[in-house]
């Protein structure tokens, strides 16, 4: 296995979802199928750094769960990202209980019930904190 290829999110409104990815993650749109459907429905592709994100038109998730995608951010960027999320009017979910020093996270839902996390820590840091407990 070479690694992660891409992530696809099914969204009700392609334009609204585009706004979400562009405003929150500074995603760059690199493709729009417009009215063509080469896959299951109309779609757009974005890059967040080197990560390929696809959004595809369809029904929103019927409910919210704790299943989520977490992106790593620097601690110094925390407040700026929080401001972006608030400006878009997105729902912020209360975080889970944490071990002291484990790092900080912002959990928030997009317009289609997908849960995202912005996390300031690393796996190595988390494992060290768990060993200390």
Image (cartoon, grey):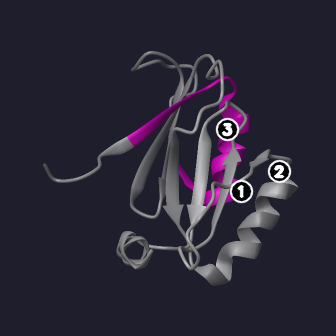
From the image, tell me which residue sits under label 3.
17
Residue picked out by circle 2: 88
- Name the residue at 76% across, 65% down: 82
Which is in the foreground here, disc 3 or disc 2? 2
The range drawn in magenta is 7-30
73 vs 99, nearest the viewer:
99
Counting from the top left corner in percent of width and height, residue 131 is at 36, 74
Earlier in the chain: of badge 1 and badge 2, it is 1
Indicate the secondary structure of the residue bearing disc 2. Answer: loop
Which callout, 1 or 3, points at the residue further toward the start of the chain? 3
Q: Secondary structure at mark 1?
A: helix
Image quarter where the C terminus lies is bottom left
Asked whether the beta carbons under mark 1 and mark 2 sit within 8 Å of each other, the answer is yes
Q: Is residue 59 left or right of residue 67?
A: right
Residue corresponding to mark 1: 23
Q: Residue 14: horizontal and vertical position, in percent?
A: 65, 31
Queried whether the magenta region covers residue 100, the answer comes back as: no
Q: Is residue 59 above or below residue 29?
A: above
Secondary element at image label 3: helix
Snapshot quadrant of residue 120: bottom right
- CB-based contact (under 8 Å), mark 3 and mark 2: no
């Amino acid at each position: 296995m070479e690694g992660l290829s891409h992530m696809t999110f099914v969204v009700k409104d392609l334009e609204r979802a585009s706004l979400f990815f562009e405003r929150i993650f500074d995603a760059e749109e690199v493709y729009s199928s417009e009215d063509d459907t080469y896959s299951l429905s109309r779609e757009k592709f974005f890059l967040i750094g080197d990560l390929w994100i696809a959004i595809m038109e369809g029904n929103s998730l019927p409910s919210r769960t704790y299943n989520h995608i977490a992106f790593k951010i620097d601690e110094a960027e925390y407040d700026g990202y929080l401001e972006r999320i608030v400006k878009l009017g997105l729902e912020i979910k209360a975080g889970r209980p944490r071990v002291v020093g484990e790092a900080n996270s912002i959990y928030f839902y997009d317009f289609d019930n997908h849960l995202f996390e912005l996390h300031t820590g690393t796996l190595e840091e988390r494992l060290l904190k768990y060993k200390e407990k």
